[in-house]
Image (cartoon, grey):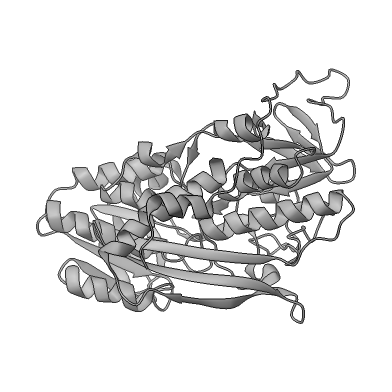
Amino acid sequence: MSITRRNFIKYTSAAVAGASVFGQVNTASAATGVIMPKKGKRIVVLGGGWGGCTAAKYAKMEDPSVEVILVERDPKFISCPISNLVIGGQKTMKDITFTRDKLAKNYGIKIVYTEATALDPVKKALTTKAGTLEYDKLIVSPGISYDYAAIEGLDNPAAIKKFPAAFKAGAETVALREMLVAMKPGGVVVLAVPPAPYRCPPGPYERASLIANYLKKNKKGSKIIVVDANDDVTSKGPLFKKAWADYYKDILEYIPDAAVTKVDASTGVITTEKGEIKSDVANIIPTMTAGKSAFDLGLMNKPEDKFVRADAYTLESYNFKDVYVIGDATHNGAVGGVPKSGYIANSMGKVAASAAVRTLNGQEPLAPSLINTCYSMVNDNEAIFVAAAYKYDAVSKRIISAAGGTSPERSVLFGHHAEDWALGIWNDILG
């Protein structure tokens, strides 16, 4: 079924709930260190990405009387979904970079651009470099970090620069694109897929497709070797492999069960479980963990945990009451079998916002449901997709799959839908 861009945005975007004035940050009190002293019901959201911005917006929409403060380090919102198209040359950084101004202007959300340093869950106080913020409810969207130390030779500035991961859209996205452009024809690109779970399961394979597409058109005689720590393509496998066979047979080589164990920044040699590869450009995506703030704020439930355990019904942290955790940082085993995707972060933001507002107002939280749609471009025009709906299961007390599937094939129409999907969800998050 075809759908126009205008209708897609209309159907997926929320109605404006009314504007209010953007609040200015007060100077921290010399006696208490508190900024913006709390006068009424307040929700603080830490992290201004897909999950955090959604949570802030939907909390304010659910109850405009609640003060909502968004804390984020970076004044720019750079979308990780769609960033592969920057690497492949179909988009620019300008196309995926936005401000959060409409959240302040349209919803009265107060935004503090600073970094959190500590959490006191008893006093309900979040300490930041700008001062301390008091809260009634705290929603944390920490994002992800890279475990560079898991690969020998990668945990140093020179190697990180030489082998960018580019799974946090920004400077590394630009760097990887520039490396591909500068590479001489006949060169070898290595793309290393990390072990699951990781952010955006189909993301590395879409990237491999778009790099292969770029090499085919611009770098005669070049090839890309995809070394995968997993035993097979983790998402949309048959669809990706069909596209590779049809378009990139002599350009893209896929090697499963080949985790990277060592890199050498001086030579470009990548060592995998199946041997060494000499690279001209290498995109090494390390094992992922929850973002650094999740560790710094004491959100980890067990010493061995890499992701944050949260209640599947409300997304409230196992460790602290009235602290909710959303997005890629959540522990799959605790929450359930949902992918670490931008759309799931968006869904989680809505679930946590509703639970926080309702409990703040003495109401029972609603049973959660989540949705996920992910489009992957396989060349300049064609895309494939996966879609799923999830619900809370009272027996297992986990989020489980309710329905879903993949596109029957790749098509130009799905490529248009991918563009519409991005515009619609960006508007839902930031508009």
Q: Quadrant of residue 66?
A: top right
Residue drawn at point x = 39 percent, y = 47 percent: 159
414, 91: nearer the viewer: 414
Residue 376: percent from left, percent from top: 36, 62
- Judged left or right of residue 304, residue 362 is right
Residue name at image x 89 percent, y 40 percent: 123
Q: Quadrant of residue 345?
A: bottom right
In the rendered image, is residue 189 in sight? no
User: Which residue corresponds to the image point at 90% horizontal and 53% vertical from the top-left?
Assistant: 362
Vertical position of residue 431 compared to residue 262: above or below: above
Q: Is residue 394 left or right of residue 422?
A: right
Q: Quadrant of the N terminus?
A: bottom left
Q: Residue furthest bottom?
A: 395
**Identity of the residue drawn at 69% across and 59% down:** 308
Residue 118 rendering spot, x and y as whole percentages: 76, 40
Residue 372, compared with residue 120, is above or below; it is below
**321 w.r.t. 22: above or below:** below
Which residue is outermost to the left?
Answer: 220
Q: Is residue 232 visible?
A: yes
Q: Nearer the viewer, residue 418 or 185?
A: 418
Q: Nearer the viewer, residue 340 or 6?
A: 6
Q: Position of residue 174 (x, y in %)?
A: 34, 41
How many numbered circles are shown?
A: 0
Quadrant of the drawing holding the C terminus: top right
Image coordinates of residue 74 in percent, x first then y, are 55, 34
